[in-house]
Amino acid sequence: MAGAERARKNAPPREDVLAAAMEMIAERGLEKLTMAALGREVGMSSGHLLYYFHSKDELLLRTLEWSEGRLGVARGRLLTRPGTARERLDAYVDLYVPEGHRDPHWTLWLEVWNRSQSAAAESAARDRQAAIEGAWHRDLVALLAEGVSRGEFRAVDPDRFASRLRALLDGFAIHVAIGLRGTDREQVLGHVREFLADALYAAA
C-alpha cells in the first residue's frame, strides 16, 4: 500500500501525461498509443495510468478535452482581437480546419466520436463531447451576430447559419484529416471562402 502511495506521489502531473499522449499521436499515430507505450513515455506503469484514467476511452477523451482547452484559448484570442468580423471569421475557419492529413487533434476527435457510438459508451462522455462542440458553436454564433449588427454580413439567423457552416467545415475537415484526394487544406479553405462570399458577406 505504501509503495502504491509513493508511486502516485512520484507520478507526473496529469497534464504532462495528456501532453505526452497528444505528442505520441502526432509523432507515431493513434494506433501506437497504448497504455503500456504511454506509460513508458512518462515513466508510469499501465496500471497506474488506469488508476488515473480508468480506461483508454477516458484517457482519449481527457486528451481531447485538454487539446480543446488549448484551442479554446487560441480561439478566444482571435475572436477578441481588433479588426473586422470578417477578418476574425477567416481566422476562426483557419483554426477550425486541420493542418493536413493525420492532423493529431482531428485524428483524436474522430476516434473519440467513433468510440462514443458503442453501446457501452456512457452518456456522460457524450455530454462532454457535446460541450466541446457547443463552445465552438457559441463563439461562432456570437461572431456572426456581431458581423450582422455591423452590416458586414447579410441579415442571416446567426444560430442557423452557424449550424450550416460548421456542418460544411466538419465535412471538409474530415476529408483533410483522412487524406481524401482532392481535398487538401488549401483547397478546402478556398471552397469555404467562396461559400462565405456567396452566402454571407454583404455586398460592398
Image (cartoon, rainbow, N blue to C red):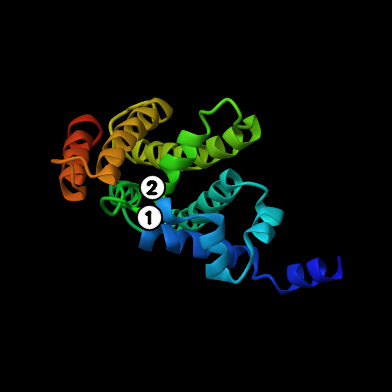
Frontmost of labels 1 and 2 is 1
Counting from the top left corner in percent of width and height, residue 145 is at 41, 36
Residue at the right extreme?
1
Q: Residue at x 86, y 70 (%)?
A: 2
Q: Amino acid at mark 1?
A: Gly
- Residue at image position (38%, 32%) is 162
Residue plotted at (40% across, 42% down): 143
Image location (x, y in percent) of residue 159? 43, 29
Indicate left or right for 172 with 96 as reference: left
- Would you say the residues marked 1 and 2 are in contact, meaning their CB atoms lie under 8 Å apart? yes
Mark 2 secondary-structure assignment:
helix
42 left or right of 53?
left
Residue 152 shows up from this direction: no
Circle number at residue 29: 1
Q: Is residue 160 above or below residue 183?
A: above
Q: What separation in Å lies between label 1 and label 2 (alpha carbons)? A: 8 Å
Earlier along the polypeptide chain: callout 1 or callout 2? 1
Q: In the rendering, at what x and y percent does residue 199 appear?
A: 22, 30
From the viewer's perspective, tell me whether residue 27 is left or right of residue 41: left
The residue carrying pointer 2 sits among few (fewer than 14), some (14 to 19) or many (20 or more) residues within 10 Å by Cα, namely many
Q: Nearer the viewer, residue 3 or 127?
A: 3
Amino acid type at image mark 2: Thr
Check the picture and name the quadrant holding the N terminus: bottom right
Quarter-of-image position of residue 10: bottom right
For mark 2, what is the residue?
107
| Picture quadrant where residue 142 is located | top left
Residue 108: image x %, image y %? 44, 47
Residue 38 numbered mark, or none: none
* Closer to the camera in the image, 158 or 26: 26
Quarter occupied by residue 51 = bottom right
> Foreground residue, 159 or 151?
159
Dot 1: few (<14), some (14–19), or many (≥20) neighbours within 10 Å? some
